[in-house]
């Protein structure tokens, strides 16, 4: 029998955050049939081993370890295939995403009027936290390009924190356009027809507690390249 909610957390060198995230989810998702799948890109810091330790006391926490494959988008795709929850959430394992938002996301989706709920750092009432000037510039530039070039109705198309109905995947060509980089949400929205019924919720982007950020200028440029490539291939919301 399928679980109610599958949470996918792509990881690389996040051993210090694994147990904290699992415990925080347990606190906010009481009464929900949920699972947490860490999709780990063979982290040298022992992230997969740490997930195994946590899984000994929390049977709904497990790891999909990938060898020879890297990237957030492809990790999410494999996570979608390796879970069976009626609803799917994607969030980072670095503790910068507010897990307390998950029950509200789930309630909105269960209402039936919405297929995709996105946690945004840039909508009214949100905060992007203490980003560097370079990261703010890259984020705002990428978001502007996605809205202008693809017509994406999102204030934060680079967000890595969202929840959707699993059946939304049946209308998406996600597998044909994803697999590289950090653009899974944009690919999902741009390749789904008709466009998904979505809603954004504000949240405050928290400081990282452990590990190192994987965001850099190269990732921002890759995102902009992906936006242009999708437009040339005719994907437009």
Image (cartoon, rainbow, N blue to C red):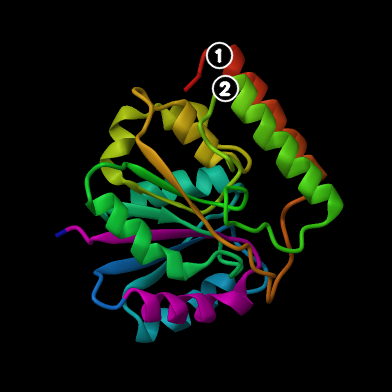
| Side of 133 relative to 213 (left or right) | right
Residue 4 magenta-highlighted: yes
Frontmost residue, 14 versus 202: 202
Residue 197 appears in the picture as rendered: yes
Chain part drawn in magenta: 2-29
Return the residue at label 2.
Answer: 150
Mark 1: few/some/many CA within 10 Å (<14, 14-19, 20+): few
Residue at position x 70%, y 62% in the image:
129
Mark 2: few/some/many CA within 10 Å (<14, 14-19, 20+): many
User: Residue 17: x and y, percent?
Assistant: 59, 76
Residue at position x 53%, y 40% in the image:
184
Return the residue at label 1.
Answer: 233
Does dot 1 land on a helix, a strand or a loop? loop
* Quarter placement of the N terminus: bottom left
Frontmost residue, 149 versus 72: 149
Which badge, 2 or 1, is on the more N-terminal residue?
2
User: Residue 162: x and y, percent?
Assistant: 46, 51
């Amino acid at each position: 029998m399928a679980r109610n909610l599958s949470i996918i957390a792509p990881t690389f060198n996040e051993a210090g955050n694994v147990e904290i995230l699992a415990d925080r989810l347990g606190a906010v998702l009481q009464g929900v049939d949920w699972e947490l799948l860490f999709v780990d890109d063979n982290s040298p810091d022992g992230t997969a081993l740490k997930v195994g330790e946590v899984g000994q006391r929390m049977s709904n926490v497990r790891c999909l370890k990938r060898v020879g494959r890297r990237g957030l988008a492809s990790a999410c795709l494999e996570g979608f295939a390796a879970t069976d929850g009626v609803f799917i959430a994607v969030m980072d394992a670095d503790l910068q995403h507010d897990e307390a938002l998950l029950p509200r996301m789930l309630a909105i989706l269960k209402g039936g009027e919405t297929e995709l709920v996105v946690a945004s750092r840039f909508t009214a009432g949100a905060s992007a936290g203490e980003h560097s000037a370079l990261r703010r510039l890259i984020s705002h530039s990428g978001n502007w390009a996605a809205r202008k070039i693809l017509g994406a109705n999102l204030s934060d198309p680079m967000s890595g924190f969202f929840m959707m109905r699993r059946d939304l995947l049946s209308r998406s060509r996600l597998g044909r356009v994803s697999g590289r980089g950090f653009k899974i949400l944009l690919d999902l929205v741009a390749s789904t027809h008709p466009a998904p019924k979505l809603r954004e919720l504000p949240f405050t982007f928290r400081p990282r507690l452990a590990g190192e950020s994987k965001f850099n200028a190269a990732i921002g440029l890759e995102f902009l390249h992906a936006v242009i490539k999708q437009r040339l291939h005719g994907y437009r919301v």
